[in-house]
Image (cartoon, helix red, strand yellow):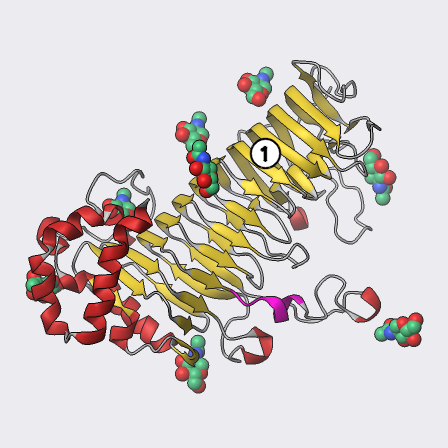
Amino acid sequence: MRHSNILPLVFSLYFLTLFLPIQARHHYHTKHKHSHYHNSPEISPSPAPFSAPSSAPDEAPSPSPSFNENYHNASNFFDLRTFGAIGDGITDDTESFKMAWDTACQSESSVKTIIVPRGLSFIIQSTIFTGPCKGGLVLKVDGTLIPPDGPESWPKNNSRRQWLVFYRINGMSLEGSGVIDGRGAKWWDLPCKPHKGPNGTTSPGPCDSPVAIRFFMSSNLTVQGLRIKNSPQFHFRFDGCESVHVDSIFITAPALSPNTDGIHIENTNDVKIYNSVISNGDDCVSIGAGCHDVDIKNMTCGPGHGISIGSLGNHNSRACVSNITVRDSVIKVSDNGVRIKTWQGGSGSVSRVTFSNIHMESVRNPIIIDQFYCLTKDCSNKTSAVFVTDILYTNIKGTYDIRHPPMHFACSDSVPCTNLTLSDIELLPALGDIMLDPFCWSAYGNSQTLTIPPISCLQEGLPQSVPGNDIDHC
Ligand SMILES: *[C@@H]1O[C@H](CO)[C@@H](O)[C@H](O)[C@H]1NC(C)=O
Ligand SMILES: *[C@@H]1O[C@H](CO)[C@@H](O)[C@H](O)[C@H]1NC(C)=O
Ligand SMILES: *[C@@H]1O[C@H](CO)[C@@H](O)[C@H](O)[C@H]1NC(C)=O
Ligand SMILES: *[C@@H]1O[C@H](CO)[C@@H](O)[C@H](O)[C@H]1NC(C)=O
Ligand SMILES: *[C@@H]1O[C@H](CO)[C@@H](O)[C@H](O)[C@H]1NC(C)=O
Ligand SMILES: *[C@@H]1O[C@H](CO)[C@@H](O)[C@H](O)[C@H]1NC(C)=O
Ligand SMILES: *[C@@H]1O[C@H](CO)[C@@H](O)[C@H](O)[C@H]1NC(C)=O
Ligand SMILES: *[C@@H]1O[C@H](CO)[C@@H](O)[C@H](O)[C@H]1NC(C)=O
């Protein structure tokens, strides 16, 4: 695939940056313009699959006037070593990385590639890579990026909530055959993490841990082919972004690592998450407030906590989530399969969600809506809630862990769930032959086919008081 095609190019670049002075590079690349063009599909000038972002006009860099002329220019490549990075896994290479970023970002050519070379390991402190940049940017990680090792080594003046941050970038691809290793173990063991305190308790205290990779207020982003592991907290967080395409990535963290969500999105629209494999200690993908038009396909999740919409409505907040599709995926050995979770007291709605063609293997709650989400066990009942409506579950098959019912719809008394549709559901116990009945509370909808186990607890029609125009206001 793409990576094998680009290998010759990458190796030639190592050679160049190691042994040739910068002036010589133009010459070399001029001679080989054609092979570069054909070997680099990810920076080819073919039409981008994304629509133009609608917001932030003043941030959009104008495209460079002459794409083809600049395309073969060797100065389109920015190897960290050219900027003094060592990559021995001991030296702090933050300043070199920043310099490479700033130089690439300000370079006039339309697509610039920053290269983290193979075989080397770069220590980078918490850094905000800021745009807007002039034209598109590729960050090609073929080597390894690591942060300082754990909270003790984290520089005191660095944010403890984020590691690599990309801010106000329009048009960026993060890719490569390398690894981004968050070295999270020492963060997971902080006494403030669940069950890490004395005698299996959680001790109070500052508990911030960095998100490995955060994209903030950015658009037209592609993340592909990378391996990311052991983040101290979420592996990816997209916040306030538009047009995001994640493809063929591999995320791993231990099943017991706290809050290590694979990909978290919030206030982010037009999202495609495809062909990726995620095993971790929390949600595989989590979808927060303000997301719409999200397509998730061909994922393999687990062990972990499954694919979640939520939690929404915390601290009486308003949340709007709509037009979400999760399809053609496998969820295994997980606490949940496909979940919608909301706190009491919130407002807004979750609507037009489709979960289809999902295979479950030993999942504790394969299908669950929980509108009583609560972490402290003493949340009081409230009358407002995030309205959940128009949810379709189709062709969801496999096995469940017998400790919980395979279908669980716990909806708000005052704001019931409506129009839940089930079709081709077949969930069998992973062990033994005891079938647990589905659970419903305040849940309206219907089953289009006989489900296994049979569901008879959904209420037909609509509740007497349908929530106001929460959807219209979203
Ligand atoms: C490469 O592009 C830079 C500006 O991005 C320009 O200054 C330089 O002359 C170009 N070099 C060649 C060989 O085209
Ligand atoms: C942290 O402090 C070091 C040295 O005092 C300085 O070089 C660095 O720029 C500071 N980093 C931040 C994020 O303020
Ligand atoms: C999206 O980014 C790519 C480079 O990553 C660029 O070629 C393309 O023009 C950008 N599209 C828009 C609409 O900004
Ligand atoms: C932990 O449990 C032991 C024995 O039950 C007790 O003596 C000790 O005080 C407890 N420690 C804390 C911090 O609660
Ligand atoms: C699904 O994703 C896996 C893992 O990335 C990949 O190997 C496989 O080819 C994908 N399947 C399809 C139909 O794209
Ligand atoms: C729903 O989202 C998909 C992308 O996942 C998009 O193609 C489609 O147009 C959206 N539908 C509506 C009605 O906005
Ligand atoms: C909240 O409401 C649910 C459903 O009516 C009920 O099962 C639960 O006991 C209530 N909790 C409290 C604390 O009143
Ligand atoms: C119920 O939800 C389905 C999608 O699951 C949608 O196609 C249908 O229009 C909804 N029905 C009503 C009455 O809104």
Q: Position of residue 255 (x, y in %)?
A: 66, 54
User: Can I make out residue 470 in this image?
Assistant: no
- Mark 1 closeness class: few <14, some 14–19, many ≥20 residues within 10 Å: many
Which contiguous range is marked in magenta? 182-188
Asked if 10 appears above or below 312 in the picture, the reply is below
Quarter of the rendering containing residue 260: bottom right
Q: Position of residue 82 (x, y in %)?
A: 24, 74
Image quadrant of residue 467?
top right
Task: Please say whether residue 338 is visible from this viewpoint.
Answer: yes
Point out the quarter of the image occupied by ligand 5: top left
Instruction: Report x, y in % for residue 308.
Output: 61, 41
Residue located at (49% from left, 50% from top): 250
Residue at figure coordinates x 30%, y 71% from the top left = 80
| 184 magenta-colored | yes
Residue drawn 39% across the image and 43% down it: 245
Q: Residue 154 vs residue 218: left or right?
A: right
